[in-house]
Amino acid sequence: EQGPFWPAVRFFTAALMHGQVNQILKFVITVMRLRVFVCLGTCNRFFGYLLFPLIFVVEKVMKLNSGHSLLGCACAGGDEVSVLSWVPLKASAGLVWALRLARFIPYADFATGPFVRCVDASFPFVSFVLDLTFSVGLAQGLSMLVDLADEQAQQKLVWMSMGISRMVREGPRHELPPPSAMSAVTAAYVVAGVDLAGAPAAGGAAPQAEGPQDMEVDTGAWAEDGAWSVFD
């Protein structure tokens, strides 16, 4: 029968991996949330002054800046776009392209012309807002998934620990001897939990019932005349 050693090893390994993966995912969520403040302070002068201490610490400690190849901001400029900003930039470009289709409306050049120029001018702002919104939404969604996975993992770890505790509490089980090694009556007693330590061997005589035994009478205390004295 399998003992509790290997289940305990699997339990501690799963608990260790769960803790490490949970910490890594929480660190990623924190970095994505800090990216919002870095991009907000980098792309806007007012927020740059307001969030300067936080941005300075993040850039020096975590090496996270607006030109990062993975977590860079959409307003950083340049030909290369960060991986996280690629989706919001493409989405903002598609939105601007769809809005510019208004210039094909006939007999509305007096309105569509200024509208298209306004749309073109708002492209950097739209891409910046979509970039921050995408980062916040991605961090929030990942946080919800981590919490859900953590709850499910905690339940499985609790069930594993309960199983190990039951195995340790019950200990090894002693199997009964085969039926050929004992009589039917003895097997019935064993199943019923009767203690057979003082029982006779199979085929032996039954034990005598305990009760009053015959006493031997001392006839020397009787006199010849039939009188009896306890002092004689």
Image (cartoon, rainbow, N blue to C red):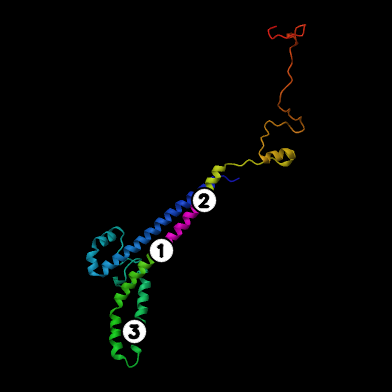
- In the foreground, 136 or 60: 136
Would residue 59 be visible to someone looking at this image?
yes
Q: Which one is nearer the viewer's eye here, 199 or 231?
A: 231
Q: Using the image, determine if residue 205 lies above or below residue 135.
A: above
User: Regarding mark 3 in the picture, which secondary structure is present there?
Assistant: helix
Q: Position of residue 63 (x, y in %)?
A: 30, 60
Q: Residue 111, relative to residue 90: is it above or below? A: below
User: What type is the residue that disc 3 sits on?
Assistant: Arg
Query: Residue at 34% of width from left, 86% of height from top?
Result: 102
Query: Element type at marker 1?
Result: helix
Report the Cα–Cα distance between label 1 and label 3: 34 Å
The answer, for residue 81, to whether it is visible in the render is no
Q: Nearer the viewer, residue 14 or 141?
A: 141
- Magenta stretch: residue 37 in it? no
The image quadrant that residue 134 belongs to is: bottom left
149 drawn magenta: yes
Nearer to us of marks 2 and 3 is: 2
Instruction: Give the magenta part as a residue range.
Output: 144-160
Percent position of residue 44, x then y? 25, 70
Q: Nearer the viewer, mark 1 or mark 3?
A: 1
Residue type at tag 1: Leu
Q: How many marks?
A: 3
Q: Badge 2, how many Cα within 10 Å: few under 14, some, many 20+?
A: some
According to the image, label 3 marks what residue? 100
Question: 10 Å neighbourhood of mark 1: few (<14), some, or many (≥20)?
Answer: some
Kind of residue at badge 2: Met
Q: Which residue is mark 1?
A: 142
| Marks 2/3: CA–CA distance | 60 Å
Residue at image mark 2? 160
Query: Going by the picture, which residue comes out furthest to the bottom?
Result: 107
- Give the Cα distance between marks 1 and 2: 27 Å
**In terms of secondary structure, what is the magenta stretch mainly?**
helix
